[in-house]
Image (cartoon, grey):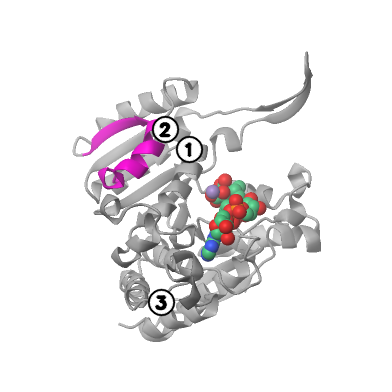
């Protein structure tokens, strides 16, 4: 097959640990499916601040731009938590999403039957749950003007939330297209009872809905959505929402799968190019211990194969291998009911690698 260039930016904390397992799985699929990848590694996040004085060095961004897809671990940690905005790892993450035009963040929460016991929710509540959060990724309060000022009662901080119609349209259209390929139900989540950006969001969804008469649209206020996700998660199929609501709701949705260590993501623009990363962060509390769950990152590779490369067979093989390994009872600590029997990051990665087959 054609050689595909993969930019690897492993980042901080458990980032490098989980990315190493994902690369092992990719190498196995090279053998099994005749795929061919060229991996190039770049500094990113806190480690890039330490070594280059900036969370997103120019050469790292260039490497990503020249690649066919980006594999990202996670960034951040206590070491950089009191840094100024420019010297925060998270600023690099927002910067790379913006610079690569990745406005659409797809976060599927697939519930593996055998992991129902790992969730804090009752198994019967999880029955039939299979949803996707489509999160707007380059707008809203994350990217609005931010500043401090002196107010009448001392210092004030300001974060502004801005959305224009074009930004809303492109993400909502993607969500409609995804809904079309699934159960044809779209929940648009907003706070239109309070926020002007949400009222524009809702108007835009309603206008676009006429282009997708086959999709049934429901508007859900974000507070209610947070509650319904725990009450009857199976009632949702595709959820589309703005940047910050999507951030929060996707972590909540992670618990439907049993652990944040299970949730994969794809960040896309208009074309096939994409950045793939687990939804979780750098998990400083368990970093360096070799116990992080690599499945979120491994499943992100399956998303990469499907959405950027069209390697459907290999994507299915990865997902099947993950399912088989879980069905056989293997668990990292985060999804283990019996914590004493938990295995580590590389052991889980090895099991999945050894289970990938045609
Ligand atoms: P987190 O997702 O890193 O961790 C939350 C909890 O989940 C922790 O207890 C952690 O141990 C656990 N966890 C996360 N991933 C796991 C995995 N793969 N296996 C097992 N357990 C896992 O969120 P946080 O603690 O709020 O943030 C830590 C740092 O990560 C912060 O600096 C934050 O800004 C950053 N962060 C980065 C990203 C990213 O790079 N995309 C995402 C979220 C948070
Ligand atoms: C995520 C993370 C990031 C976000 C942070 C680290 C900037 O929480 O990818 O979900 O809020 O987008
Ligand atoms: Mn998040």
Residue 322 appears at what percent x and percent y? 37, 73
Above or below, 137 relative to 168: below
> Residue 97: in sight, yes or no?
no
Residue at image x 48%, y 62%?
261
Alpha carbon distance from label 3 to label 2: 36 Å
Alpha carbon distance from label 3 to label 1: 33 Å
Q: Which residue is mark 3?
A: 330
Q: Bin the neighbour count of mark 2 within 10 Å (Cα to Cα): few under 14, some 14-19, many 20 and up.
A: some
Q: Which residues are magenta?
A: 215-237
Above or below, 118 relative to 195: below
Q: Which residue is mark 2?
A: 222
Q: Bin the neighbour count of mark 1 within 10 Å (Cα to Cα): few under 14, some 14-19, many 20 and up.
A: many
Q: Dot 2: what SS? A: helix
Q: Which residue is nearer to you in this view: 162 or 262?
A: 262
Residue at image x 76%, y 27%?
148
Q: Is residue 167 magenta?
A: no
Image disc number at residue 245 = 1
Which of disc 1 and disc 2 is earlier in sequence? 2
Alpha carbon distance from label 2 to label 1: 7 Å
């Amino acid at each position: 097959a054609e050689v595909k260039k993969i930019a690897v930016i492993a980042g901080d904390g458990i980032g490098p640990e989980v990315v190493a397992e994902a690369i092992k799985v990719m190498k196995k699929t090279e053998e099994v499916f005749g795929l061919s990848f060229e991996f190039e590694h770049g500094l990113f996040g806190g480690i890039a601040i330490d070594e280059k004085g900036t969370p997103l060095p120019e050469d790292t961004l260039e490497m990503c731009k020249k690649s066919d897809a980006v594999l990202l671990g996670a960034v951040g940690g206590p070491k950089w938590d009191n840094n100024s905005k420019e010297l925060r790892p998270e600023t690099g993450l927002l910067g790379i999403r913006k610079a690569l035009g990745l406005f659409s963040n797809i976060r599927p929460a697939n519930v593996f039957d055998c992991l129902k016991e790992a969730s804090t929710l009752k198994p019967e509540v999880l029955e039939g749950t299979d949803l996707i959060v489509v999160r707007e990724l380059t707008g809203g309060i994350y990217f609005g003007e931010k500043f401090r000022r002196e107010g009448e009662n001392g210092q004030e901080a300001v974060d502004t939330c801005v959305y224009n119609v074009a930004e809303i349209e492109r993400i909502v259209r993607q969500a409609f297209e995804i809904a079309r390929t699934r159960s044809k139900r779209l929940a648009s989540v907003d706070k239109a009872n309070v926020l002007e950006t949400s009222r524009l969001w809702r108007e835009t969804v309603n206008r676009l809905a006429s282009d997708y008469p086959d999709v049934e649209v429901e508007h859900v206020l974000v507070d209610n959505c947070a509650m319904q996700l725990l009450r009857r998660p199976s009632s949702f199929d595709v959820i589309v929402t703005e940047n910050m609501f999507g951030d929060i709701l996707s972590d909540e949705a992670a618990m439907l799968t049993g652990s944040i260590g299970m949730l994969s993501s794809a960040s896309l623009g208009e074309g096939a190019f994409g950045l793939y990363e687990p939804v979780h962060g750098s998990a400083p509390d368990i970093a360096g211990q070799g116990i992080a769950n690599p499945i979120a990152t491994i499943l992100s590779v399956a998303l990469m194969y499907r959405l950027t490369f069209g390697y459907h067979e290999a994507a299915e093989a990865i997902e099947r291998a993950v399912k088989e390994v879980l069905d056989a009872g293997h668990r990292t600590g985060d999804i283990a009911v019996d914590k004493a029997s938990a295995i580590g990051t590389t052991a889980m990665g090895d099991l999945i690698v050894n289970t990938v087959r045609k």
